[in-house]
Image (cartoon, rainbow, N blue to C red):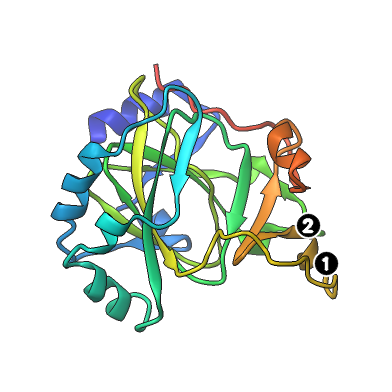
Amino acid sequence: MDTVLERIRSLNPRLRMDAVNDKSFRPYGRVLQGFDVSDLLLTMNSRSIPEEGNVYVASDAELESSHVFAPIQESVYGSMAIQIGYCNGKNSNLNGLEYHKCSEINIAVTDLVLLLGRVQDVQNNMFSSEQIHAFFVPKGTAVELYQTTLHFAPCKISDEGFKCIVVLTKGTNEPLESMPAKCTEEDELLFMRNKWLLAHPERRILIERGAYAGIAGENTYLQYA
């Protein structure tokens, strides 16, 4: 792991980067121990990586039939209803940052890097990409991202791309049935059910879908080769 991390660090000298087992990860989340995710990883062998871009599936019936579904639901989510899906892709840019009013579990099927921030650093619905903290997640590792952690699609560290299992409370990332009344400043960021989103202005596909342009600075790019 250290060899991979050091290689990625050397290619991205302007980016603050650590491993998820480093103490600097504590404000963002924790590494989950004690859950046997082996059958989830096996199922992901048949979930392909697209040739371009990313694919996100919020709920996958086969993943949700795993024996670890109930232990995760009971232990991490206090028996709240959950969904297990995945995000696979070829992403290398920040593009946006989202957060939920619940924790999100990411299980790295391949080695990958997460670009993270903190909700506490969002001021007037703006976040500076200079505050991004990158974390290397080795394959097979499960991490819980706290609800105050800004995150988006993982970044690849090889030409093949990345695969990541995603666990959230049930219904998260589904379309809004109607746009809520704008009662607070934060309401401008609500993009889907239980999904508040800040988009980078360069990510036109998100802006055109109504995402709030709330990231200042560079659209962080992770160099991997």
**Counting residues from the N terminus, which is met first, the one under dot 1 or under dot 2?**
2
Disc 1 residue type (three-letter): Glu
Image position of 215 with respect to 123: above or below = above
Rendering coords of residue 150 (x, y %):
57, 55
Q: Are marks 1 and 2 in contact (CB under 8 Å)?
A: yes
- Identified at 40% across, 30% down, the residue is 156
Identify residue for label 1.
Answer: 185
- Measured in 3D between alpha carbons, the distance from the residue under mark 1 to the one under mark 2, in whole angstroms, is 7 Å
Give the side of residue 189 with respect to residue 101, left or right.
right
- The image quadrant where one finds the C terminus is top left
Categorize mark 1 by other alpha carbons within 10 Å: few (<14), some (14-19), many (20+): few
Give the side of residue 202 with respect to residue 13, left or right.
right
Rendering coords of residue 199 (x, y %):
70, 44
Q: Quadrant of residue 46?
A: top left
Disc 2 residue type (three-letter): Asn
- Identified at 66% across, 41% down, the residue is 129
**SS class, disc 2:** loop
Image position of 107 with respect to 185: above or below = above
Rendering coords of residue 77 (x, y %):
38, 77
Q: Nearer the viewer, residue 89 or 110?
A: 89
Q: Nearer the viewer, residue 171 or 135?
A: 171
Rendering coords of residue 58 (x, y %):
45, 55
Q: Nearer the viewer, residue 154 or 45?
A: 45
